[in-house]
Image (cartoon, rainbow, N blue to C red):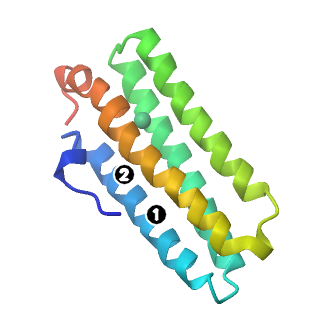
Amino acid sequence: MNWNAKFATGIGTIDAQHRRLFEICGELQDLAEKAKTEDRYEQIRLVLKDLTDYTVAHFGLEEKYMQESGYSERDYAYHKMEHDAFVAKVSKILDGDWEDNQHQTVSKLLVFVTAWIKAHILDTDMKYVATLKAKGYK
Ligand SMILES: [Fe+2]
């Protein structure tokens, strides 16, 4: 899964972080392939931990920007709810029992994560862009 211009919000820090999220998904995709035939449990755990930590930090920054810029409370609450649900879902899988089921678990997770990130950027993140830009974020 590759980042491309249609995902650009035009806000530098956010776009850089979104690119990194796509990269982490790419790492996960490689490991999922290898896990078809090899034990990659520890590596996958590390990348999933990275994904969780990185999304938590990234969502925190977006939420800070939305609050600082006076973004509507209602839209903020909805946006934060999407973030929290994502973190809860990935954390739950990470904490589950999937060592004997690595390829299937990670492949399934990737379908969810990649679809979620794309739809979230295009539908939910894009909604704060005008407000942030009006406040001088770039
Ligand atoms: Fe977001």
Q: Residues within 10 Å of mark 2 (few under 14, many from 20)?
A: some
75 up-or-down from 33: above or below? above
43 up-or-down from 98: above or below? below
* Count of numbered badges drawn on the protein: 2
Q: CA distance from mark 2 to mark 1?
A: 13 Å
Mark 1 vs ligand 1: CB below 8 Å = no
- The quarter holding residue 89 reads top right
31 up-or-down from 54: above or below? below
Are dots 2 and 1 in contact, CB under 8 Å?
A: no
Q: Residue at x 64, y 89 (%)?
A: 37
Disc with the residue nearer the chain's start (2 vs 1): 2
| Direction from residue 125 to residue 99 in the image, left or right | right
Q: Quadrant of the C terminus?
A: top left
| Direction from residue 11 to residue 48 in the image, left or right | right
Q: Quadrant of the N terminus?
A: bottom left
| Residue type, label 1 | Cys
Q: Kindly identify which residue carries mark 1.
A: 25
Residue 17: which disc? 2
Residue 55: which disc? none
Q: Residue at x 65, y 69 (%)?
A: 104
| Residue type, label 2 | Gln
Q: Could you tell me residue 4's position as x and y percent? A: 21, 56
Q: Residue at x 51, y 56 (%)?
A: 111
Q: Could you tell me residue 22's position as x and y percent? A: 38, 59
Q: Residues within 10 Å of mark 1 (few under 14, many from 20)?
A: many
Picture quadrant of ligand 1: top left
- The quarter holding residue 109 reads bottom right
SS of the residue at dot 1? helix
SS of the residue at dot 2? helix
Q: Could you tell me residue 77's position as x and y percent? A: 51, 17
132 up-or-down from 60: above or below? above
Q: Residue at x 19, y 46 (%)?
A: 6
